[in-house]
Structures are given as structure tokens and as C-alpha cells.
Amino acid sequence: MRKVIIDTDTGSDDAVAVIMCLRDPTVEVLALTTVSGNVPMEQATLNCLMSVELAGLAVPPPVYKGADRPLVRQPVHARNVHGNDGMSDCGLIHPTLRAVEGVHAADAIIGLVEKHPGEIELAVIGPATNVALAMMKAPETMKKLKCIWTMGTCGFGRGNTTPVSEFNVFADAEAYRVMMDFGVHVYVGGYDLCTSEAAWFDADTERLLASGSAAARYAVECNEALAKFCLAIGGERRIDLPDTVSLSPMLWPDVVLAASECVSHVCTAEPATYGQVIFYDGGTLAAMGPGFDFAPYGKKQPNCTVIHRIDTALYKKRLEALLVRQHG
């Protein structure tokens, strides 16, 4: 069975992705690691533990606490989107599970990669701080990752935090650059992949609530703040779930309808472009001609696969099936 580690800043959309991955029978989640992002790391840990509990596994995987701040910049959070607790402030977070004490998330990742060389797929659905720390501390071990899956970047669209930056990258662009430049292939689900038909609308949430599943109810209720945020900024009540959308190709490769092999560049220098990730898919650029060779791209081999279209109906059908299925 495929082996996965989930690194998360557990806000409400992360919570749904955690349950989705834990319940999918095609992967084994060896551990979850938490990081500062949507909410501070300690709150992200509580939210992660609660989501693991709701997944209902007989033997839940361990949860490790990680970085409580970015590599360089000051911490930023998204409480205006997800609520103060990251889960819509409706009293959902009361885990009985506890995080592992005395082992940092970066060290947990390193240890598991060393134990399972060439097998670990790392699912990064928050800022990449823990991943960058592991890569800087034990580069030879981290080269043994099988691959990385990430919800991050704008893809080929616009940002959700600045016009050119998506939140997970903006929260720690230096760490994201370490991860993207490291040399392990990265599968990217950008923000452009995650909105529109991929969102939950009223018909979706009503069906989930009617299912009688505790996990489905939790998935809907924890995203109430996000639904209100989407209504306020877009005039439409919906729940965008970037993390579940971006990880769906990891679980179900047949949902992918279009993807491009790309070379990436993460911008960290200028405030106006901080967190922008530029993707070059090898096409001829008019100003450069067919011999295009310009830093930072040059003639580098692609370091990532950018997924830019999925079968949203199939993805939503499978996600719903996992949420409503009774576990335990």
C-alpha cells in the first residue's frame, strides 16, 4: 500500500482533506505533522487531532507538532476566512487524542523517510516550513522521498492572498522555494484548480447533512465560516476546498484531465510579488524564440507537474462517498 505523510496547518478545508485521506483504502497515512498557517500551530494541532478522531480509524496515525513560525517572515494567519479556531468557532474542537511529545514534525518526517526510502509521498497542504526544515537538516535522507503533493501556488490563475500569491506560499515563501528547488518531483494543485464547480454548494452540503454521518456533518459545520466568507466576497454561498481538490489526484489519478510538466520559480525578494510562483511549461515565448534560455529557467528539466483540470463531478462523488461511509 502507498505510504503518505500529511503536513497541515489544519483549517477547515484541511480537516476535510485529512478525513478524505485517512478513509481512502488506497493509501496508508503513516503520520500527520502540523505547522503554523491558517491558525497558530498549537490550534492547528488540536484541529488535526479532532479530524483524525472523526475519521474513525481503529488505530489512528500519530500527530506531530511542527514549526510555530515561518523560516524568515512574521507569522500570518487566515482567521478572517476560517474563524478564530480555524473551524468556524462553533465548538467542534475537543479531541481526546493527543499529539506525540518530544519529537518535532521535521524529525518525524526525516525518520519515516529513512525507514521507508523511496516510498513516502508527502502531502503538503499548509505552508512548507516543516518540509524545508527537514530538507535543510537531512538533505540526503529527504532525497529519498518518492514525491511531494502540494496545495499551493495560484497555478496558472490569480492569487487568493495577493493578486499573484496563494496563502500557503505567501505564509512562508522561503520555505516553499526550498521545497520546490530541492530536487524531489512535486505535483502541484494550484488555487485555480480548486474553485468553481469543485466547490460545495447548498445541494452538496444538504445531502451530506442528511446522510447521518458524523464525519460529513463535521466537514460541513467546520466550514461555515468559509461559506460566509465566500458569500461576502463573491456573492455566492459555497465552500471552496482547495486541499481536498489538490490531493484528489494523489488518491485518484483518473480524475486528472489536464496537467503540464513545468519548471518553477518562487519569488521571495520583492514585496509586490512575494509568494508568486511562476511556472514555465517549455512553450516558445515570442520575445525569446525557440532557443529560450533565461534565468531562472534556462534549460532546466521540469521539477514539477502542475495539474490544471480535473473531473470535478467524479472527485466530488468519491469525496462524498468517503465522508458518508460509516467507520469504526
Image: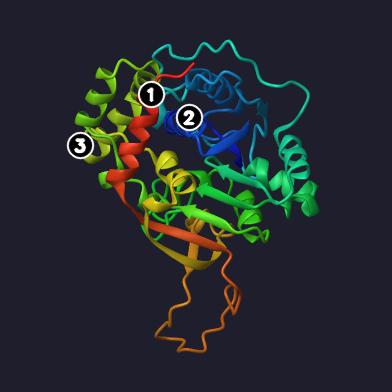
Which type of secondary structure does the marked residue at label 2 adopt?
helix
Percent of width and height locating residue 284: 43, 83
Query: Which quarter of the rendering shows the N terminus?
Result: top right
Marks 1 and 3, Cα distance to the nearest angstrom? 29 Å
Instruction: Give the amino acid type for the residue marked by disc 2 in the picture.
Output: Arg
> Callout 3: few (<14), some (14-19), or many (20+) C-alpha neighbours within 10 Å?
few
Marks 3 and 2, Cα distance to the nearest angstrom? 30 Å
* Rendered residue at 28%/28% (across/down): 228
* Rendered residue at 66%/20% (across/down): 99
* Rendered residue at 21%/29% (across/down): 202
Which type of secondary structure does the marked residue at label 3 adopt?
loop
Q: Which residue is mark 2?
A: 23
Please tell me the numbered disc located at residue 236: 3
Q: Name the side, left or right, on which 63 lies relative to 83.
A: right
Q: Is residue 194 above or below residue 183?
A: above
Q: Is residue 267 above or below residue 82?
A: below
Between 288 and 94, the one nearer to me in the picture:
94
Q: Name the side, left or right, on which 287 lies relative to 9.
A: left
* Rendered residue at 61%/14% (across/down): 97
Q: Earlier in the sequence, mark 1 or mark 3?
A: 3
Q: Earlier in the sequence, mark 2 or mark 1?
A: 2
Q: Name the side, left or right, on which 23 lies relative to 202.
A: right
Q: Which residue is mark 1?
A: 325
Q: Is residue 46 above or below residue 159?
A: above
Instruction: Give the amino acid type for the residue marked by disc 3 in the picture.
Output: Glu
Percent of width and height locating residue 105: 70, 34
> Callout 1: few (<14), some (14-19), or many (20+) C-alpha neighbours within 10 Å?
some
